[in-house]
Amino acid sequence: MFDILFHIQLLGVVIGFANLIVVSIQKSSENQKILMAASTCAFISIIAYTLEMQATNIPEMLLAARFGYIGKSYVMILLILFECRYCNVKISDKIMKGIFIFNTFMLLVILTCPQHDFYYKNIGMVTSGFFPHLQFERGIGYYMFMAVTLCLMGYSCYISLVQCLKRKGDERKRIFLLMLAGVFPTLILGLYLS
């Protein structure tokens, strides 16, 4: 089963890299630059998880997991920024800067998690299941970061739904796909946290 999961993950890496190439060769615009940054963040997360799957000990797994947060910390902010610009929806610069500062602080907390218990506690490795993986207690920082991430995902879905209902034809289809891109990760993260 591990081989199947690992090959699915590798397929995600290839698709993610192909996405980076496609977005990067498009005619440059501000929206395209934001989408490229969001795609890069998602790609970093995919690569990190692939490395985590291949890790054989706790330090390697933890390094890969921490590396993944470089992408996870900013992907939702960038996707919302892209959505707002694409759909001509106004969002407060102060709110976006506040979330960016919060997520940057949380990234620093995550990158230094071996030195404290604010994000992860009692980090260990479990060898049962499809592949060895980290097991840990979640600290208050973890719940703070996930709460902000879920709020961002929910807001992304809200923007897309409202804009989808306002539009017609091909534009409605594009925004519907944008909405699906936000709904599925939100549901999966919600299930993971429950």
Image (cartoon, grey):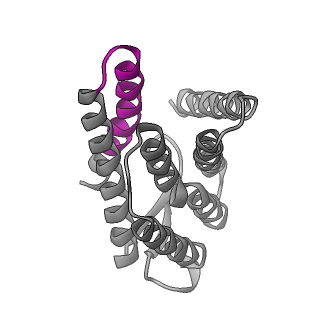
Query: Residue 42 placed where, x, y %?
Result: 57, 45
Out of 126 and 10, give the one closest to the viewer: 10
Query: Residue 48 placed where, x, y %?
Result: 63, 51
Which residue sits furthest top?
A: 169
Image point 59% across, 32% down: which residue? 12
Image point 35% across, 14% down: which residue? 169
Task: Report which quarter residue 39 is drawn in.
Answer: top right
Which residue sits furthest bottom?
A: 116
Task: Report which quarter residue 120 is drawn in.
Answer: bottom left
Counting labels gives 0
Out of 40 and 158, give the one closest to the viewer: 158
Q: Is residue 41 above or below residue 4?
A: below
Please give left or right for residue 127 compared with residue 33 in the image: left
In the image, is residue 50 part of the stretch drawn in magenta? no
| Magenta residues, start to end | 167-188
- Note whether residue 148 is visible: yes
Out of 37 and 138, give the one closest to the viewer: 37
Image point 57% across, 85% down: which residue? 115
Query: Residue 91 placed where, x, y %?
Result: 38, 57
Q: Is residue 171 above or below residue 49?
A: above
> Which secondary structure is most common in the magenta stretch?
helix
